[in-house]
Image (cartoon, rainbow, N blue to C red):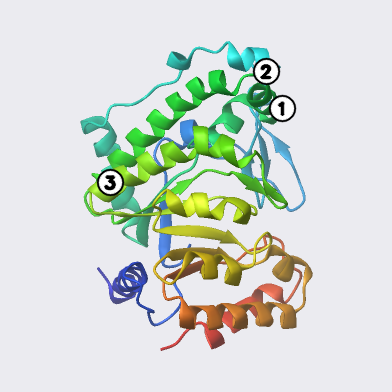
Amino acid sequence: MNDDLARKYARVRQMLRLERPDRLPFVGRDLGFIEYRKEVYHLGEPEFVAMNGEVVVSRDGKKRYTRDGGVWAVGDEEKYKTDVDVLNEDPMAFEVEEVGPAMLGEMAQLYAAKANSFYPAPWHYGTLVTRCVLVFGWEPFLLACAVDAARLGKLMDRFGAASLAVAQGWAQTPGVEFIVIHDDIAGTRGPFMRPQWYRDYVFPWHKAIYDAIHVQGKKVLYVSDGNYLPIMDDVLATGTDGVYVESSSMDPAEVMRRGGKDKLYMVKTDNRAVDFGTPDDIRREVEKLRRLHEEYPGIMMYRGGGNPPPGNAEAFEQAYNELLVYA
């Protein structure tokens, strides 16, 4: 391991121990995400390269690609047209994998490939709510929730069991110390569903997944986009070691105040500052993050914004190097 890579590992491990390292750890520079069976639990890789502002359609017409947003789609519109199609689906149609040599071998290969350049952090994307959106699409999924939540819950239990198996596999993979579990439960204006729905069908599975990770002595961080502050107490009650903060939807200071100093925080800086703000706006946001890092040591970050105007990306780099690099 070369000196630069060793410093990346040391930096992330200090953060995981809730010690402030020599600079604020940066996702994509210090940490690198790895995903198991991305074509099943996420959306796979783009078939084509999209230019700025362009939306490209996949060969089968079911996926869209953008330069900044990667791959996105909202369910199989041919198979799931209405809530009836969703509720009539057989839960056994969805695989729950065995945590065995095949899975563990593939995970070990993913870890080893990433470990040459970054501290590897497994990321599981399509857990429960997000998996429903990926498979069924927004409208059929939401209608099924409204028509027969308990019946939909049988399908979600299958997705929960599948996600639990993946988490158990990552937690047993040699070298893995930290796992990220993603499941979008909120938009910019707040949670998608009423709190009790999450308590009945989502949070028990989240807790089971985190418990399985903790049994192996590993840490877990939960990621949801949007503003989940109205149900943050429920999120924390699942036992996660940390949470994600999308600064365009929530004030990081408020999230950290409620979460406490013993939690990890993955902060995405505000897209609006980089894409639409000025260099002064960017610097003010980075200054705020520096002040928070003085109080909350378990912070990691990555830059929000995917299409900055001339000078803004450079302004962010300058602010980061001057304010968030300490040695």
Of residue 48 and residue 302, the one placed in the foreground of this image is: 302
Of residue 133 and residue 36, the one placed in the foreground of this image is: 133
Dots 1, 3 in contact, CB < 8 A: no
Secondary structure, mark 1, is helix
Vertical arrangement, residue 216 with respect to residue 98, above or below: below
User: Which mark is first along the chain, 3 or 2?
Assistant: 2
Q: What's the mark number on residue 83?
A: 2
Dot 1 surroundings within 10 Å: few (below 14), some, or many (20 or more)? some
Q: Name the amino acid, label 2.
A: Asp
Of residue 46 and residue 105, the one placed in the foreground of this image is: 105
Which image quadrant for residue 255?
A: bottom right
Of residue 27 and residue 113, the one placed in the foreground of this image is: 27
Q: What's the mark number on residue 2?
A: none
* Residue 144 visible in the snapshot: yes
Q: Name the amino acid, label 3.
A: Ala
Dot 2 surroundings within 10 Å: few (below 14), some, or many (20 or more)? many
Secondary structure, mark 3, is helix
Give the image location of residue 300, x and y in percent.
Answer: 47, 68
According to the image, label 1 marks what residue? 139
CA separation in Å, label 2 and label 3: 35 Å
Dots 2, 3 in contact, CB < 8 A: no
Give the image location of residue 12, x and y in percent.
Answer: 36, 68
Vertical arrangement, residue 277 with respect to residue 189, above or below: below
Q: Name the amino acid, label 1.
A: Glu
Give the image location of residue 159, x and y in percent.
Answer: 45, 28
According to the image, label 3 marks what residue? 171
What's the residue at 43%, 65% (across, down)?
264
CA separation in Å, label 2 and label 1: 8 Å
